Image (cartoon, helix red, strand yellow):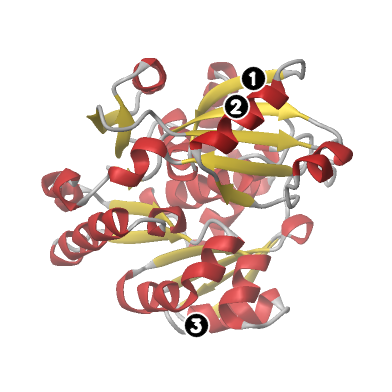
Amino acid sequence: MIYGIGNPLIDIIVNVEEDDLVDLGIHKGTMALINGERMEELLAFSTGHTVSYSCGGSCPNTIIALASLGIDVTIAGKIGSDENGAIYRSRLRDLGVGDELVETVRERTGSTVILITPDSERSMNTYLGANRLYGEEDVNIDTVARADIFHFTGYMWDTESQQGAIMRALEVAKANNTTVSFDVADPFAVGRYRKAFLSLISEHCDIVFANREEARILFDNYDPYECCRSMGKLCRIAIVKNGKKGSFISCDGEVSSIPVKGPVVPTDTTGAGDVYAAGFLYGQYHRYSVRESGIIASILAGEIITQRGAQFSAEKSALLKAYFESGSWREA
């Protein structure tokens, strides 16, 4: 079983123009944490634009993608006792995802307004809401202990309460030989917690995902290959995603290059990194080699960017599941 602790968020996806980002004072391509007042402002702006809704959150996206491929998964996090929380729970049930979400009446369910420009770049504005309150006491240590893989992201470092929860889960994972997977997840998070993340990677993690920008900030180096080499000295498997140029994976100090799969011009990059992580963890769960896991990750990321949103339809999921189970992807 693969277990994730993350931030369950209702995604509100809005198509915008470049000028809209300027008018709103939003730095393109990043994730900003916002307060309730700013969220209301963005919701008011979205009126009159094309809007869609889905279950979101970086770690939940990864866990949901794994469930769509037939992996036994569970997600933990905190939601409000509200309509959005109920919708989120119902959606997880429909997707076959184990639910260890904890409810609170103190805050509403978190949400993210995702603004997508014509070049398919996404700018995310997240109101954490109930997520901020997820704490050590909410962690189901029995589930962590039973898991084959425990996955979390850098977004969990935004409150001391969440940090405490992750550190507790990491203690349990270490004691029970649970593989630990960490997705750095956001350049701004790296900027805020660089030293903490380097310590996490070297002391607690087996598998680490970063994109080239996150890796650059971590290691103060613009060369993603060199960043991968550096990160590979800190953990067993280090992955640096290099956009249209594919990705680098270091395993036990040896770096290999994984080619990009899919279109060079994306429809929507929302969730591409989360789905890449799902593909790699799918491969590792099935005990494929690191390179084979990287190829699966690249295929999945290439598929998700051909559509809007961070999740596959039931039909697409069934096709992908059959494709990977057939083994024909090895010749792709």
Q: What element does badge 2 sit on? A: strand
Q: Is residue 62 left or right of residue 257?
A: left
- The residue wearing badge 2 is 12
Q: Position of residue 223 (x, y in %)?
A: 72, 79
- The residue wearing badge 3 is 253
Q: Can you tell which of label 3 and label 1 is closer to the viewer?
A: 1
Q: CA distance from mark 3 to mark 2?
A: 41 Å
The amino acid sitting under disc 1 is Ser
10 Å neighbourhood of mark 3: few (<14), some, or many (≥20)? some
**Residue 177 against residue 3 in the figure, above or below:** below
The amino acid sitting under disc 3 is Gly
Name the residue at 58% across, 28% down.
40
Name the residue at 45% across, 59% down.
154
Quadrant location, the C terminus: top right
**Residue 240 against residue 326 in the figure, above or below:** below
Q: Is residue 118 left or right of residue 313?
A: right
Q: What element does badge 1 sit on? A: strand
* Residues at marks 3 and 2 touching, judged by CB atoms closer than 8 Å: no
Q: Is residue 7 left or right of residue 263?
A: left
**Residue 286 against residue 14 in the figure, above or below:** below
* Residues at marks 2 and 1 touching, judged by CB atoms closer than 8 Å: yes
10 Å neighbourhood of mark 2: few (<14), some, or many (≥20)? many
